[in-house]
Image (cartoon, rainbow, N blue to C red):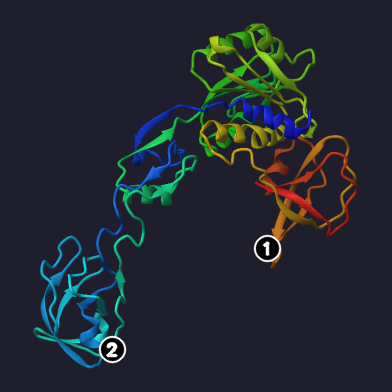
């Protein structure tokens, strides 16, 4: 199956996504807004001083030097209550309300004060150093769209809009089940024919980065009984997605498909025209299992990582209502060396990319692309995309990359 068709099917499974919850704004970092947020107040709610100085009437200081009578003070949170009359000024501080009658703020460094007399040395045009009411936003303005991933800047804006709680999408719950008799956890002493399990840690990190909540379900042995027991445990966890790591192919010891079918899985597809990651599986249980989505990733660690990036991450974003979940994340680049013609599978080559002075990335694929080699993946900062049946390309030819 072509990558684009596989991705479409995976994203279609998101449906209406996860439920909406209301949480205190302090708990919403990294969550996705469920409804468009509207301002509950105007900001600033009054004309405010942008500087420390003196509030005055521009007409009184059109000709300088001009000496004004100081009649009071306006500070943030404590305004001067009366209106200015001709020839008067008020000491004012940054963020303080501008008194009625004043239409300019004179910087304190442009004045000389002597008792209650303030001499202005620099003429200032009307409106200078005043933040007008509503210059930032007005009550009723729709400022943060549904589907926005909330970060520091959006949270600051939401707080300024006077929202103590935000409607956000519940984080998708993702179970991660590694499979294989050959696997042991990091820190254990592996047997002579065993290796260290690493895929679940990479996928968990990608889940968290995409806004999901990962749950490590450990390692299942290569037996139907072990797998079916693990699936039964997962069924009680109210997961949105169960990700299996390894065992998705059809070798004699690849039993994940068989165990899932025995459990009632409706298999959507298995095998994709991509490298690495061909033996990826996707399916779904019925409503009796809450419509649990199953993403079966290859056991090779680089294939597992690339498939997570290309399919699991977009699915998680779709589940939380991100309107850009399925967008192409690749960017234009140029090759630093020739590459051979491609076969029928879409290729994701681990590569290093460095930006030229004009900002265009120049990309160099690593010479060895074995999907078991984590050391190469760790050195890579990009994936070089090669379309199916792409012809050979020369140094300097255009290409596309996905930044890691």
- In the image, residue 85 above or below residue 38: below
Left or right of 307: which side holds 52? left
* Image quarter hosting the N terminus: top right
- In the image, residue 1 above or below residue 52: above
Q: Dot 1 corresponds to which residue?
A: 359
Q: Nearer the viewer, mark 2 or mark 1?
A: 2
Disc 2 packing (10 Å; few <14; some 14–19; many ≥20): some
- Seen at 87% across and 44% down, the residue is 390
- In the image, residue 89 above or below residue 369: below
Q: Earlier in the sequence, mark 2 or mark 1?
A: 2
Estimate the x, y position of residue 213 in percent, counting from the top left: 49, 30
Estimate the x, y position of residue 206 in percent, counting from the top left: 58, 36
Instruction: Specify the quadrant of the image occupied by residue 186.
Output: top right
- Seen at 26% across and 85% down, the residue is 110
Closest to the observer: 112 or 100? Answer: 100
Estimate the x, y position of residue 117 in percent, counting from the top left: 12, 86
Left or right of 206: which side holds 337? right
Estimate the x, y position of residue 68 in percent, counting from the top left: 15, 86
């Amino acid at each position: 199956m072509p990558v684009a068709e596989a991705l479409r099917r995976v994203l279609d499974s998101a449906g209406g996504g996860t439920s909406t919850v209301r949480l205190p704004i302090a708990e919403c970092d990294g969550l996705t807004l469920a409804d468009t947020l509207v301002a509950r107040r105007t900001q600033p709610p009054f004309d405010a001083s942008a500087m420390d100085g003196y509030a005055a009437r521009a007409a009184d200081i059109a000709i300088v030097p001009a000496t004004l009578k100081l009649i009071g003070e306006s500070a943030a949170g404590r305004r001067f209550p009366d209106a200015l009359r001709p020839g008067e000024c008020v000491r004012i501080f940054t963020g303080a309300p501008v008194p009625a009658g004043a239409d300019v703020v004179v910087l304190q460094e442009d004045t000389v004060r002597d008792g209650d007399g303030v001499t202005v040395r620099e003429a200032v045009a009307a409106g200078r150093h005043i933040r007008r009411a509503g210059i930032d936003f007005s009550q009723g303005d729709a400022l943060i769209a549904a589907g926005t991933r909330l970060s520091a800047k959006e949270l600051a804006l939401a707080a300024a809009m006077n929202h103590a709680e935000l409607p956000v999408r519940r984080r998708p719950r993702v179970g991660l089940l590694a499979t294989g008799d050959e696997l042991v956890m990091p820190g254990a002493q592996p047997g002579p024919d065993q290796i260290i399990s690493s895929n679940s840690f990479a996928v968990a990190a990608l889940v968290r980065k995409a806004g999901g909540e990962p749950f490590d379900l450990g390692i299942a042995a290569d037996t139907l009984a072990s797998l079916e027991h693990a699936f039964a445990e997962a069924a009680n966890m109210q997961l949105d997605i169960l990700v299996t790591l390894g065992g998705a192919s059809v070798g004699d010891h690849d039993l994940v498909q068989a165990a899932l079918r025995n459990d009632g899985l409706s298999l959507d597809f298995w095998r994709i025209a991509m490298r690495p990651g061909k033996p990826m599986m996707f399916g779904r249980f019925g409503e009796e299992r809450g419509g649990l989505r199953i993403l079966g990733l290859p056991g090779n660690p680089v294939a597992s990582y690339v498939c997570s990036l290309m399919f699991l991450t977009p699915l998680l974003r779709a589940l939380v209502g991100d309107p850009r979940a399925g967008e192409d994340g690749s960017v234009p680049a140029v090759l630093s060396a020739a590459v051979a013609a491609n076969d029928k599978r879409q290729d994701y080559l681990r590569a290093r990319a460095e930006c030229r002075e004009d900002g265009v990335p120049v990309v160099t694929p690593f010479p060895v692309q074995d999907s078991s080699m984590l050391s190469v993946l760790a050195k890579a900062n990009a994936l070089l995309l090669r379309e199916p049946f792409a012809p050979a390309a020369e140094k300097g030819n255009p290409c596309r990359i996905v930044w890691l």
